[in-house]
Amino acid sequence: MQFQVKQGDLSTAKTPCLIVPIADRTRLDGAAATIDKAGDGALSAILKKGDLSEDCGGIQMLYDLPGAQAERVLLLSLGEPEEWNRAKQRDALASAFGAVERSKATSATLSTAGWIQNGDATTLARDIAIAAIDAGYHFNQCKSDAKAPRHPLKKVILLTASRAETKDARIGIEQGRAIGNGMSLTRDLGNLPGNLCTPKYLASKARAMGRQAGGLKVRVLDEAAMKKLGMGALLSVARGSRQPARFIIMEYKGGKAGQKPVVLVGKGVTFDAGGISIKPSAQMDEMKYDMCGAASVFGTLQACLEMELPLNVIGVVPSAENLPDGDASKPGDIVTSLSGQTIEILNTDAEGRLILCDALTYVERFKPAAVVDIATLTGACIIALGHEASAVMGNDESLIDELKQASEEAGDRVWQLPLWDEYQQQLDSNFADMANIGGRPAGSITAGCFLSRFTKNYSWAHLDIAGTAWKSGKEKGATGRPVPLLTTWLIERAGK
Ligand code: BES
Ligand code: MN
Ligand code: ZN
C-alpha cells in the first residue's frame, strides 16, 4: 500500500474515490462544507433525502457529485458527536476502507478536515493507515486458484491544511503503515497451517527477515544446542513430535550501543494437540494459532525495522510442536528447566509455560530493561475476559501501567489480573520444585505464577492473548493482535 501526505483542497482533487466524513448533517463543516459550497448545495440536498445512515460507520457512495472532481464520493457518517471517540474513529475508517475495497477504485483520497477532533493529525493518520491495510488483508496463500482481489486499493492520499499538519500526519502514516504491515505478517504466520508453519519454518522466516533487513541479527539454536544449555523444559515438549524444536533469537539494534534492550518472548507452539493429555477434537484445528505470540514478535520487530525505531529490541521465540507419541512426555514426568528448578508435568497440555520458562531464563543474559512475553497460554483467559481484552500480569506495576496506556492508545485492550503470592501454592508438587498446572481455579493467574518463578531478576510482564489472537467461526482468522499494543508501547519508549 502506497501512502501520500500533502497539503491540498479536496474539492479539486481528481481521484477515483474521495472519502468525506459527515459529522453534523445540518451544519456541514470541513471537507463536506467545501464540496457543498463548490457544488451549490448539491451535497446538502442529497443528505436531506436521508439515505445515509446516521450510525457511526454508515456509508453511501455517490457518483459525479457536483462540487467534487472525484469519480466517486464516499459519504461516511461519524454518528453522534457526543459519542465520538477513538474507537468510533477506527470503526468508521474500517467501514469506509471496506467500501473502497469492494468498489473498483484502486486509490482513495481523504482530508484531515471535518473529523470530530479527539486527537491530532498524527493519530488520525495512524488510524487511516492501519484501516487501509487491514481492509486489504486476505489470506489465500493456500488456495490453488489464489485469486488476487481484482481491484485492490493501492494508494491512499491524505490532504492536510498546513505544513505543520503535513509533518504530523506523515509521522502517523509511517507508524500506522508499520503497525499495519506488522499485523499482516503476524496474521499470515498465524493463518498458515501447522504442516507448513513448523518450528523450522519460523526459523527460516526469521533468517529471511535478517537477510532482508540490515540491522536485524538472527541466531537459531537447534535441539543439540538447547540440550547443551540445559533447556530440559522446552525439549520435553518437542519429544512427541517429528518436528524438531527451534530457539530463535532476533536482535534489532536501533538504539545506542550501550542501551539495555527490551526483550519480547513469544510462545511458538506451531500446533498444540495437548500431547498425551490430548485435547478433544472439536475445533482442534485452531491450535495452529498456538504460535500467535511468536507471530506477534515477528510482526512487531518488522514494524521496528520499518520505522527504524531508535531502540534496542530483542525478539526470542521458543518453538515446538506438542503431539502425542510413544516418546512423548507423560503426566508425572519430571524435567529440569534451564533455571535448575525441577517441574512435575502433571498435564502435558500445559506446554506453553514449559517452553516459555526456559526462554525467560535464557533472556537474563541480555540484561534487559524489560521483558514482555506474549502467549496463547490458557483457555481460562477466554473464560475470564472473552475476546475483547488480552490479560496482562507481571512483577513491575510501572511496566504494566505503560502497557495499559499503550493498549488504550492503540485500541488493543488489556486487562490486568493479579499475581498475588497466595496463588503460588496451587503449583505445589510432592515430587518436584513445582507442578506445571495449578488446578481449575484462576487458571490464567496460576500460569502467570508459574512464569513468575523464572523472571525474578528483571522487570517483566506477561500477555495472555488466548482470546484475542484469532477469531473463530465464519470469520476464522488471525487478528494481528497484540502488534498494535506492542508497537505503540515501543514507540512510546523510544520517545523517552
Ligand atoms: N494453547 C493452549 C491454551 C488455549 C486453549 C488457547 C484454547 C486458546 C484456546 C494451552 O497450551 C493449553 O492447552 N492450556 C491448558 C492449560 C491447562 C492444562 C492447565 C488449558 O487452557 O486448558
Ligand atoms: Mn496446551
Ligand atoms: Zn498451547
Image (tube, rainbow, N blue to C red):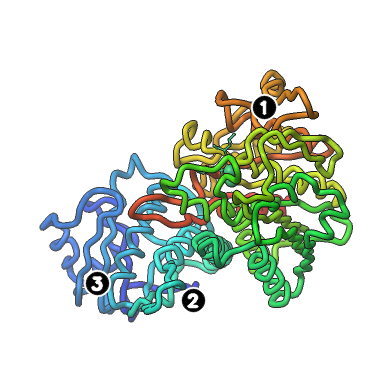
User: Crowding near pointer 1: few (<14 within 10 Å), some, many (20+)?
Assistant: some
Q: Are marks 2 and 1 in contact (CB under 8 Å)?
A: no
Residue at image mark 3: 38
Query: Which mark sits nearer the N-terminus, 3 or 2?
Result: 2
For mark 3, does the 10 Å Cα neighbourhood hold few (<14), some (14 to 19), or many (20 or more) residues?
Answer: some
Residue closest to the far front:
326
Q: Position of residue 168 (x, y in %)?
A: 56, 62
| Residue type highlighted by circle 3 | Ala
Sooner in the amino-acid sequence: mark 1 or mark 3: 3
Which numbered disc, 2 or 1, marks the residue closer to the eye? 1
Task: Give the left or right position of residue 84, taking residue 234 as reference.
Answer: left
* Residue in the image at 54% along x and 46% along y: 409
Q: Residue furthest left?
A: 49
Identity, as a three-letter code, of the amino acid under mark 1: Leu
Q: Where's ligand 1: which quadrant?
A: top right
Residue matched to label 1:
419
- Secondary structure type for disc 3: helix
In the picture shown, does residue 216 fall above or below 431? below
Residue at numbered disc 2: 2
Question: Can residue 276 be seen in the rendering of this structure?
Answer: yes
**292 above or below 104?**
above
Label 2 packing within 10 angstroms: few (<14), some (14-19), many (20+): few
Find residue 463 and report its image quarter: top right
Mark 3 beta carbon near ligand 1 (under 8 Å):
no
Q: Nearer the viewer, mark 1 or mark 3?
A: 1
| Residue found at x 29% / y 70% | 102
Q: CA distance from mark 1 to mark 3?
A: 61 Å
Q: Is residue 342 left or right of residue 315?
A: right
